[in-house]
Amino acid sequence: MATAEAREASSISATIASLQSDQAATQAELDKTFFLNFGKKGELKDIIKGLKKEIKESTKKLEKQEKVVEKADKALGKEQEAAAKAKERADKIVAEATAASDKITSAAEKKAASITDAAAKKAAAVTKSATGKAASLTKAAEQSDKQAEKLRK
């Protein structure tokens, strides 16, 4: 957007420079013209007058175009600023979401570890109890075997 307006302003500036060059060349030709050659002098003066008028019109166009470029640059600056603010807000939201996610994940991991530890403790207690019962049953079985052995003799 701004570049198109800037190109237009540059084009108008080039046109003004070209017209000023033509005016200078025509003025130089007028200055070289014999002072009694009224027809040619009048014609060159008319050309210079026309060139001055065109330069004036082009200068006004250039001023207007420069104002348009300035407005476009200001609008672009405002849009870029708004985009930067929106990005900051988005980054903040992402950071907050990440922090919340990390907090939830940490809590879930702690809970899972707690459940696993409790299950391991229960399993250890059941194993210990079963081992104790198995030992007592083994002892009782051995005593029964001894008694059976005594009875056989």
Image: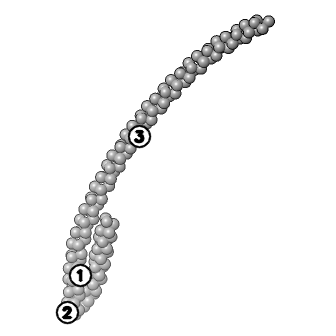
| Amino acid bearing label 2 | Phe
Query: What residue sits 36% from the left and 43% below the top?
Result: 92
- Which of labels 2 and 3 is toward the front? 3
Residue at image x 64%, y 16%? Answer: 134
Q: Which of marks 1 and 3 is nearer the N terminus?
A: 1
Mark 1 is on which residue type? Leu
Q: Label 3, on which residue?
A: 98
- The percent position of residue 50, horizontal first and vertical second, equals 21, 83
In this view, the residue in front, 60 or 115, is 115
Q: Does 122 sit above or below residue 105?
A: above
Percent x, y of residue 49: 20, 83
Residues at marks 2 and 3, CA–CA distance in whole angstroms: 88 Å
Mark 1 Cα shell of 10 Å, populated few (<14), some (14-19), many (≥20): many
Label 1, on which residue? 51
147 lies above or below 64: above
Q: How far apart are marks 1 and 2 (CA)?
A: 20 Å
The location of residue 105, given as percent across then percent down, is 45, 35
Distance in Å between CA atoms under marks 1 and 3: 68 Å
Q: Which amino acid does label 3 sit on?
A: Thr
Q: Where is residue 140 in the image (x, y as percent from the top left)?
A: 67, 11
Name of the residue lying farthest toward the right = 153
Residue 85 visible in rendering: yes
The image quadrant that residue 41 belongs to is bottom left
Which quadrant of the figure contains the N terminus? bottom left
Where is residue 123, by image quadrant?
A: top right
> Vertical placement of 121 versus 47: above or below?
above
Cβ–Cβ under 8 Å for marks 1 and 3: no
Report which residue position mark 2 lands on: 38
Residue closer to the observer: 43 or 15: 15
